[in-house]
Image (tube, helix red, strand yellow):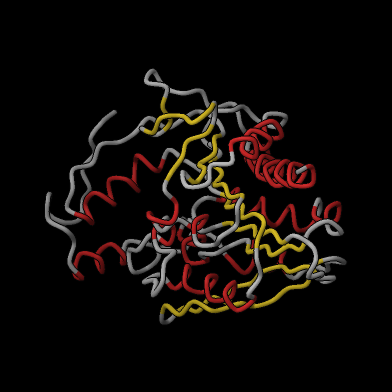
Amino acid sequence: MSDTTYPIGTPNIPWNNSEKTQWLQLQHKKRDYSQLVVSRVNQPNEFLSVEQYGELNYPPLNFALYLFKSKNWQSDRPTVLITGGVHGYETSGVMGALAFAQTDAQEYINDFNFIIAPCISPWGFETINRWNPDAIDPNRSFYDNSPAQESAAIMKYMASLNTQLIAHIDLHETTDTDNSEFRPALAARDGKINTNWNIPDGFYLVADSEKPAPEFQKAILNSVEKVTHIAPSDENNQLIGVPQEQFGVINYSARELGLCMGFTDAPYVTTTEVYPDSPSASDEQCTQAQVAVITGALDYLKSV
């Protein structure tokens, strides 16, 4: 592990609004949400309709928020929520959700109702950021009266459906920039000392410690390992500083931490973590690993 300082702020003193503004001024658009995401959302789909569920307002910018929903919705079918791009910089989560909606979803469309929100954080997607423009992490903001527009929008939509979920699959990545940028920035923002973690080389899952569902997680890993390798633990039998619950799986207290996977009452939840910076994994493998997560999870749910 290594310590890394950050160029904004004073060590051990949390940022004020001036420093958050300084941080925001350094952020720039690096890719286009409309071109890379919205254009694919709007492609014809025989089985899924598209709904706008909200809008992010960051003057002068506005981002329409879209999701897919099963056209032939049946109240007696189990419902599955799939989310991607909660952290906008985690590309394969967005691309994996889109790929599933456009391909494999049709294989399961008569077994489940689907809600697929492929890009929760469009501004983060465009600027390749973990935070939103207010220097807030959406994936720590899934709670009532959320300060993050991104989190509040999808929670409001899901509450409006008044639908019981069987599963929620949240698609993420762990990248080298966690250590080079995002963890140092987090420590600086909060006035804490940063200690970087060892980034696992490979895929792993984060389960909810309140409902870990180990057989569900194992079924997902079995599906993913056909596409890419599962991350080995470190010398302490840990991943990112957390003890493994089983090979390739760690547990977090999802609701307590305000994680996306914790905001519903679904009994089966998981957060994926692929490693796109691995020399043994391509971008396409990472996207297909996310698809394999979803299909592995659905195959398991069909069997229970």
Q: Residue furthest top?
A: 235
Please name the residue shown 71% across and 61% down the image. 79
- Would residue 74 be found to the left or right of residue 12 on screen? right
- Would residue 235 be found to the left or right of residue 17 on screen? right
Residue 27: x, y in percent? Answer: 37, 62
Residue 77: x, y in percent? Answer: 79, 62
- Would residue 53 be found to the left or right of residue 183 on screen? right
Q: Quadrant of residue 219?
A: top right
Front residue (pair 10, 243): 243
Please name the residue shown 39% across and 33% down the image. 242
Residue 38: x, y in percent? Answer: 66, 68
Please name the residue shown 42% across and 77% down the image. 58
Q: Quadrant of the C terminus?
A: top right
Residue 60: x, y in percent? Answer: 43, 81
Q: How many marks?
A: 0
Please name the residue shown 43% across and 31% down the image. 239
Front residue (pair 144, 225): 144
Q: Quadrant of the N terminus?
A: top left
Q: Above or below — where is 252 with respect to 142?
A: above
Front residue (pair 215, 278): 215
Q: Quadrant of residue 75?
A: bottom right
Q: Quadrant of residue 149?
A: bottom left
